[in-house]
Amino acid sequence: MTKKMFFLAIVLVNSIVVFSQEKAAPVFKVGAAKIDITPKPADFPPHITGVNDNLYVRAVVIDDGATQSALISTDPGVSEESWQKYTRQIEKELGIPVVNIFISSSHSHSALMMMPGNDPKMALFQSNLDKAVIDVVKQAKSKLQSARIAFGEGKAYLNVNRDAINPKTRLWYQGSNPDGPSDKTVGVIKFESLNGELIAVYYNYAMHPNTMFMSGVLSGDFPGMASKYIEEYYDDKPVALWSMGAAGDQNPISTRPMMDVGRFKTNAALASGKAKDEAEAIMMGSSMDVQVDPKILARQSQMISSLGQLLAEEILNVLDNTEKYESNIHISGDQKVITCPGRKRTNTGREGAAGTYVDGDPVNIRLSLLKIGDIALTGVDAEIYNVIGQQIKNQSTSAKTIVATTTNGMANSGYIPNDEAFGRYTFQVLSSRLKPGCAETSIVNGVLDLMEKVK
């Protein structure tokens, strides 16, 4: 063989190797969809009087060439039973592994959720939700296209710690505590087609969507308004999914409209004689069919529009300035359940005074991890305090970490305070079904263990 022929042979072999490697490289694909699940007026449950903004389920399906994952956001809450049903059905019908599925409820306090009872209109809503969750994943999967992904972070000064001392009574209450721990980070995952068109946005922020609480009207609250704003900005082509961060002790910076409605309905419940104390009156008031001053309801609606637009604008800023894309992505996920000692409260009172407790059943808490390339999406099926979320981020093995709460089921823990916070006599702490000294460390270490295992 001449030198020239030998050289050509080497070039040919190398070309075949390169071609084979390129052909074998995984193709990253993304598809997104949303479904409107707002009930018709004839199907409203008794305590619902109208619609402020529509309710949705949204989904992103991600394909790395070898496996798939699904990110799902629902305005209504998702019970533990429903989560089990949805994930098993998605795995069976669509082949997406349960550990690769993230279902995050928005935790909007004005979106419907099944409660004990046999109301046929609530049962109809639940049935429609069940169907929509599966259908939205099917639709998203049918729209898979070659894509790339990027991660970015911004800051929004819209939340505030809500474990506070009442300036009048000097007792613990749910109020504004600007000096308390509060993570202002907005986490954003950007999914874009190879020609630069936005397919989907997954965003995360630690703030309670409770502004429309007790309004009697349906609403996705500020996340619903933020998603609507983002989607409309891009001519309704992409889908914007929300997940709540570590917001167990985080309120919107202003809660006046919510508190005005709350006081009105709570007083009505107490005046009726059916509620024995404030805590019971608040729960009863949320389902009372009492006409509220329309001016107060208008202020509630205006507040969620303001919060939603400000949050959305920061997300748009992040999208504009996030340009480090990846398209050779590997997906992997895992979950684990930790168990902590439980307690059962024996006295009453919403806040201000110490609670008394006896031993209760152990509490199970589900932790989830989904790695999308070097992005770590972590999940907890409960409302954790902000300090716990900050610890997960600070100790994470990935600089690109999001903490999504009320995700993948619903623990029976109630709120999950960090250990130091158990000394505060707020509603969140008093109502927690956990004994102090376990959950904070177990959650942080459990998530870190999942990261080490998946790595």
Image (cartoon, rainbow, N blue to C red):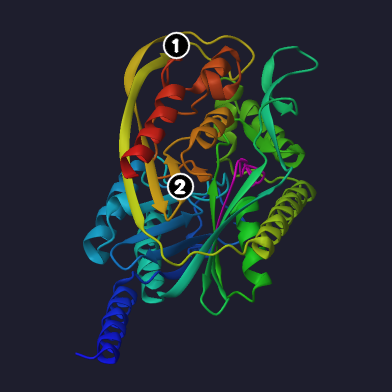
Q: Position of residue 266 (x, y in %)?
A: 65, 31
Instruction: Give the secondary structure at mark 1.
Output: loop
User: Circle 2 sits on which residue?
Assistant: 376
Q: Residue at x 28, y 65 (%)?
A: 66
| Foreground residue among 278 and 374 | 374
Give coordinates of residue 438: x percent, y percent: 41, 18
Q: Quadrant of the N terminus?
A: bottom left
Residue at coordinates 39% horizontally, 39% vertically from top-left? 410
Residue interval drawn in magenta: 201-217
Along the viewing direction, whichever of 374 and 16 lies nearer the viewer? 16
Q: Is residue 199 above or below residue 391?
A: below
Is any part of residue 219 visible from this angle? Answer: no
Residue 50 magenta-highlighted: no
> Of the residues tagged 1 and 2, which is closer to the observer?
2
Query: Going by the image, does 197 lie left or right of 84?
Result: right
Residue position marked by numbered label 1 in the rendering: 346
Is residue 296 toward the left or the right of residue 45 in the image? right
Label 2 is placed on what type of residue? Ala
Residue depicted at x 47% and y 49%: 105
Residue depicted at 53% across the width and 14% down the height: 348
Asked which secondary structure carries label 2, the reply is strand
